[in-house]
Image (cartoon, rainbow, N blue to C red):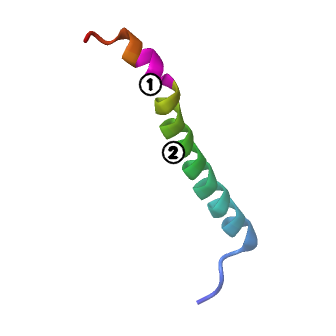
């Protein structure tokens, strides 16, 4: 089986890295917005 071309490996690595960063940013966004949400919630 032949190895995939270098361009395809770079693209795959880049897409995986972007997916991971997007997930991390979403999780951090929840923690950043938590004080605002808690202040607005009824007791």
Determine the residue positioned at 53% across, 36% down.
28
Q: Pinpoint residue 37: horizontal percent, then vertical percent.
A: 40, 17
- Say which quarter of the image contains residue 1: bottom right
- Measuring from the top left, give residue 4's x and y in whole percent: 65, 77
**Tag 1, which secondary structure?**
helix
Query: Main SS of the magenta segment?
Result: helix
Left or right of 25 on screen, residue 36:
left
- Left or right: where 37 falls relative to 7: left
Name the residue rendered at 38%, 18% in the picture. Answer: 38
Q: Tag count in the figure?
A: 2
Q: Is residue 32 above or below residue 15?
A: above
> Any magenta on residue 25?
no
Q: Residue furthest right?
A: 6
Residue 43 vs residue 16, the one in the foreground: 43
Which quadrant is home to the C terminus?
top left
Residue 33 percent coordinates (x, y):
48, 23
SS category of the residue bearing label 2:
helix
Between label 1 and label 2, give the one nearer the viewer.
Answer: 1
Q: Residues within 10 Å of mark 2 (few under 14, many from 20)?
A: few
Q: Earlier in the sequence, mark 1 or mark 2?
A: 2
* Farthest residue, direction front: 43
Q: Which residue carries the number 1 mark? A: 34
* Residue on which the image places disc 2: 23
State whether residue 5 is above or below residue 2.
above
Q: Which mark is residue 5?
A: none
* 3D distance between C-alphas at marks 1 and 2: 17 Å
Q: Residues within 10 Å of mark 1 (few under 14, many from 20)?
A: few
Give x and y (percent) for residue 9: 67, 69
- Give the magenta range: 33-37
């Amino acid at each position: 089986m032949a190895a995939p071309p270098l361009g395809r490996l770079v693209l795959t690595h880049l897409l995986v890295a972007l997916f991971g960063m997007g997930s991390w940013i979403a999780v951090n966004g929840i923690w950043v917005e938590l004080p605002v949400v808690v202040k607005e919630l009824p007791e």
